[in-house]
Image (spheres, rainbow, N blue to C red):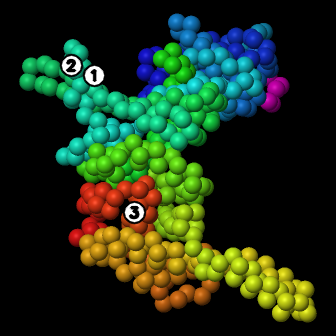
Amino acid sequence: MTNYQWDKDFDAEGWFWLAEPEERFYGRLNHDAREGPRLHFYDVPGSGFSDREPPIVPEARILGELPGGQPVTLEGFFPTRWQATGLDPVTTTVDGFAQSVLVGCHLQEGAPLVAAGFGASLYGLEPTLTGALGEPGLLNPRTGREAGGMTAGEAREFALPDGAKLSVHAGETGSYSYRVTRTEVSAGVSVAAPAPAEAEELERKYLEPLREFVTFCTRRPSYVQALKLGDNHGVNVLRRPLPYPRQPQPDQYRLGLNLARVSEPDDVMHRWFVLREEVGAVWNLLFSTIGAPEVVLENRFLDLMAFSEGYHRALRDDPPLSKAQARAGRDAIKAALADEDPKIRDVFLTRLSHANSQTQRDRLIELAGQAKALLGDHWDFDPFEQCRAMVDTRNWMTHWGSRTKYVASDPASLFGFCRHLDLLSYIAVLRDLQLADEEITTAVANGWVLENLLH
């Protein structure tokens, strides 16, 4: 085993045992790129013909040793089939799958994996850093020094808001023979955290934002291909890569955001991590749609509508009344209802907490108006009319009440709504990354040139 990547198949055999008691049994590890790690154990102790329960309890942590003495930890083993044969001794086999496989360490039960950083490879990272076809990139691996058949490439370091250091690098490998020349560009990232942290925290805080950034730039699903926690002799983490595209993606022709075309790429990367925290939970809705093109059309539309409303609420909320005006209005209504039936008071007073807020239509029109002001006649979109149709359609699909004449729930209309929502969401994020108008226009003109949305 030399290639520990989430999206690469491999097989390995070795000895395994439970943390307690330490009784070894033989096993085979088969890692499938789409299905994740599968395990097949032989001569597992503690089972007989009459046993109905598996000899290994679900979610058990199993330790192991691969060829060459390499330690391995299986986190979250789930038995799917077990079989006992023979009489004396009984031979028990167990099949199942593991949630994660940690190659390079032994973790005892309850002990978390702690590291001060990680290195990773992300699907789509190469065009994000080196540019799409015909586009320059932030890094050019061909400018590096030659070392045999390999180019050293380029690297760049970014300072993240919490003091962590993010390094990105790209390189080129090549092979040459009679009439054939082959080159391949590769890219990777590494993060040095300000202090050691548990693996799950490192992934949540740094790895997921990076994967989302690649998705934002390429406008295609991205997933983690390889992850190593710690230094060069650290721990390889293997699990099913998600989200995994159903079909191979074609070559990248355009980027929705190219760091080579902005004046301050360091500020953009820094601001990306800040913006993600400022927006909060609704941030994930954008990437659950643009990062998963197979999502049902109705769900895609509702998610993009929810993202637009939540994004505006998080960053651009502008209530119609001041706090003092809203308080005076609530007090007046409470006084007017003081002698009414308690049930009437409860119904109306509970709604007062949401009275001083913008409607979804107001929020969407504002976001669309900003995008329209930037793109002008290049974008065939009427913010007032089409936002009203989108909001009415969303309300009807959510509440299934009366249907207005503006509701358009046919597939063609929903598809058009999604494309426009995708565009205005991108422009809102690009604005809040503090890009100049001409930089946003360039990003949109390049990223949407094949979408037939711009003239």
Label 1's element? Answer: strand
Identified by mark 3, the residue type is Ile
The label number, if any, that marks residue 146 in the structure image: 2
Labelled pair 1, 2 in contact (Cβ < 8 Å):
yes
Per the image, label 3 sits on a secondary structure element best described as: helix
For the magenta stretch, what is the residue range?
A: 49-54
User: Left or right: where does residue 121 sit relative to residue 228?
Assistant: left
**Relative depth, front residue between 419 and 269:** 269
What amino acid type is highlighted by mark number 2?
A: Glu
**Local crowd size for mark 1, using a 10 Å CA cut-off: few (<14), some (14–19), many (≥20):** some
Dominant secondary-structure state across the stretch colored magenta: loop
Q: How many marks?
A: 3
Instruction: Indicate yes or no whether the magenta region holds residue 51.
Output: yes
Question: Could you tell me if residue 186 is visible in this image?
Answer: no
Distance of label 1 from label 2 (alpha carbons):
6 Å
The disc placed on residue 152 is 1
**Residue 413: x and y, percent?**
40, 76
The CA span between labels 1 and 3 is 36 Å
| Kind of residue indicated by mark 1 | Ala
The CA span between labels 2 and 3 is 40 Å
Q: Are the residues flagged by discs 1 and 3 in contact, CB closer than 8 Å?
A: no
Name the residue: 13% across, 19% down. 177
Q: Find numbered disc 2 in the image and state the secondary structure of the residue it sits on.
A: strand
| Residue 307 visible (yes or no) | yes
- Name above or below for residue 402 compared with residue 435: below
Q: Which residue is mark 3?
A: 427
Image position, residue 110 (x, y; %): 75, 26
Ranked by sequence position, the earlier of labels 1 and 3 is 1
